[in-house]
Amino acid sequence: MPQILVLGATGYLGRHVTRELHHRGHTIHAIIRSRTTAETIGPWSAPSLSGIVSEWIEGDISKDNLVEGITERIDYVVSCLGVTTQKADPWDIDYKANLAVLADAEKNNVRGFCYVNVINGEKCPSRMTRAKTAFTNTLERSSVVSQVIDPPAYFSDMMQILTMVQKSGRLWTFAPAGEVRINPIHGADLAVEVANRLEAAQQGRWKVGGPDVFTWQDLADLAGKTIGRKATISKVPAWLLRLLLWTAERLTPRKADMIRFLVWNMTNDAVGARTGTHHLAEFWAEQVTAPCP
């Protein structure tokens, strides 16, 4: 059976990818910080990794002593690795940690490296997307066969929208509500795409989204319908956005970077090829019925 190393296995997407690859008969090696965490159900009902990982590699992937020689018995690497809510610098995780594993993979003639990036990330001004873009560029020049998957957003990301409407009955946006489109994708559906591309062993890059395309007005309406109350939508004034960024830069630069990322995503289309069987309406309804921390 092919030996696959999964980076970011305990994240929302990483859990779905690990389970999908295991179900297809691959042998999974996973880098994790805590096996206890890995073997419990993840946020937003992401699956436990209990019983589906053959080798646990516990430690901090940003440390060189963990990465050296890590791909010696590996056929393929799948990276869902990236900074989300952590306080880490994206350049340390999204770029340097992935780069260290890629260097080891090149040394050991790994057959393929599949990386989950973000749609249109090369145009976004946030540190996170710049770090992802820098790694993607390096990966595509590598001697290792590369597959780069660019999703617009995960269903887990969309929980911020539902939570906002639950708390205030209002969705704040940074652009006219009916003009910008996005088709977020469920982790299980994206995992299928990742596994398909990996198994095809064909170099390339693909923009992949979910089956339903929304405007931000559509998302506000759907969130309101999900919780049983009318949701209103408002545009953040330009002066207020400038003030938010100015304040965040001085207090919490990490939050300022997340604001830049959100502004970009709310003001630019993010639509990938429509695929999958999971729908956001059903996902939100499930979370309202049985919320996951």
Image: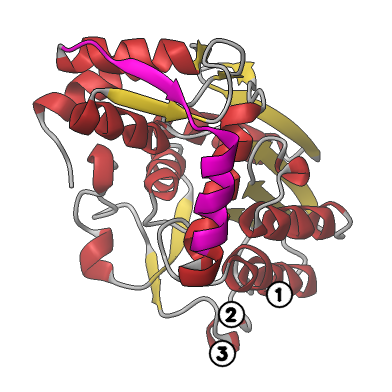
User: Is residue 247 or residue 264 the one in the foreground?
Assistant: 247
Can you see residue 6? no
Q: Position of residue 234 (x, y in %)?
A: 42, 22
Q: In this view, does 70 lie above or below 10?
A: below
Amino acid tagged 1: Asp
Amino acid tagged 2: Val
Q: Name the residue under label 3.
A: 65
User: Is residue 245 or residue 9 the one in the foreground?
Assistant: 245
Q: Mark 1 points at which residue?
A: 104
Helix, strand or loop at mark 3: helix
Q: How crowded is mark 3: few (under 14 residues within 10 Å), some or many (20 or more)?
A: few
| Left/right of residue 263 with respect to residue 216 in the rendered view | right
Number of numbered callouts drawn? 3
- For the residues labelled 2 and 3, the Cα–Cα distance comes to 6 Å
Residue at position x 26%, y 34% from top? 163
Quick one: which residue is furthest to the bottom in this view?
Answer: 65
- For the residues labelled 3 and 1, the Cα–Cα distance comes to 12 Å
Q: Position of residue 195 (x, y in %)?
A: 56, 37
| Left/right of residue 22 with respect to residue 67 in the rendered view | left
Helix, strand or loop at mark 2: helix
Q: Is residue 59 above or below residue 194?
A: below
> What range is drawn magenta here?
229-248
Amino acid tagged 3: Asn
Which mark identifies residue 67?
A: 2
Q: Where is residue 267 in the image (x, y as percent from the top left)?
A: 63, 28
